[in-house]
Image (spheres, grey):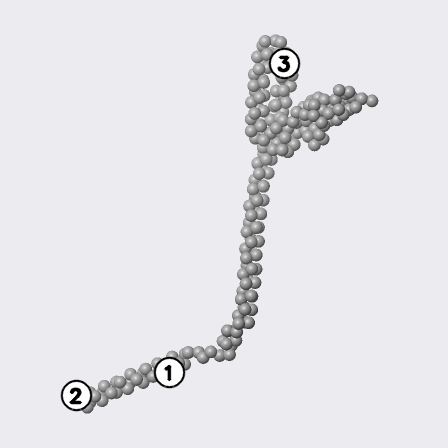
Amino acid sequence: MSDKSQSEQQQQQETKVESAEEQVLDAAEQVEVPDEDFEAELDPESLQQEVTALRAEVQIEREKALRVAAEAENVRRRAAQEVEKARNFALEKFAGELLAVIDNLERALQTIDREDSAQANLAEGIEMTHKGFIQTIEKFGLEVVNPEGQPFNPQQHEAMGMQENADLPPNTVMHVMQKGYLLNGRLLRPAMVMVSRAAN
């Protein structure tokens, strides 16, 4: 091997060593030496305070999420109630219109002479129609208020008058002049009644 190539190899090795030394120095400069602030961050008391603060923030966020969920549930419930009210109102109006038809059928049944065979057949047809109407409206939550013989209830009955009656207790419905109706438990029309009172 010639001196020249040995010298070149030695020079290359020195260059490599110098390059490696420079890299080590650069890396050493980049490594941050822990300072006092870092050591303060590792202090157990400050870490505990930070954990407590983070837990408080988590609790606040959890409460916010619960409030949002509760508000969403309230909105859903209110919307369902509004839909139900709208449905009931539409049904109430429709049922109110049907009551006049039912009243007319009942009046027709009261005026028919059942002794006459022609009228008896007519009465049978009217009774079937009346029964069909009642069954249909009952499917939609409409119920008949026919309180004859029951105590007078001002929330469901409208007193058209009072009569003395020794056979019945005072404030008893003696006669129903017009039936009342409830729709889903709410009064649609009060029953028009005659009420008993004690004899003087």
Specify the farthest residue to the bottom. 3
Specify the farthest residue to the right. 200
Label 2: state its secondary structure.
loop
Count of residue discs: 3
Q: Residues within 10 Å of mark 3 (few under 14, many from 20)?
A: few
Q: Relative to 165, does residue 1 appear above or below in the rendering?
A: below
Residue at which label 3 appears: 112
Taking the spot 50% from the left edge, 76% from the top edge, the residue there is: 39
| Label 3 or label 2, whichever comes before in sequence order | 2
* Residue type marked 3: Ile
Q: Position of residue 194 (x, y in %)?
A: 73, 23
Residue at which label 2 appears: 1
Q: Residues within 10 Å of mark 2 (few under 14, many from 20)?
A: few
Q: CA distance from mark 3 to mark 1?
A: 120 Å
Residue at which label 1 appears: 25
Specify the farthest residue to the left. 1
- On screen, residue 16 versus residue 27, left or right, reads left
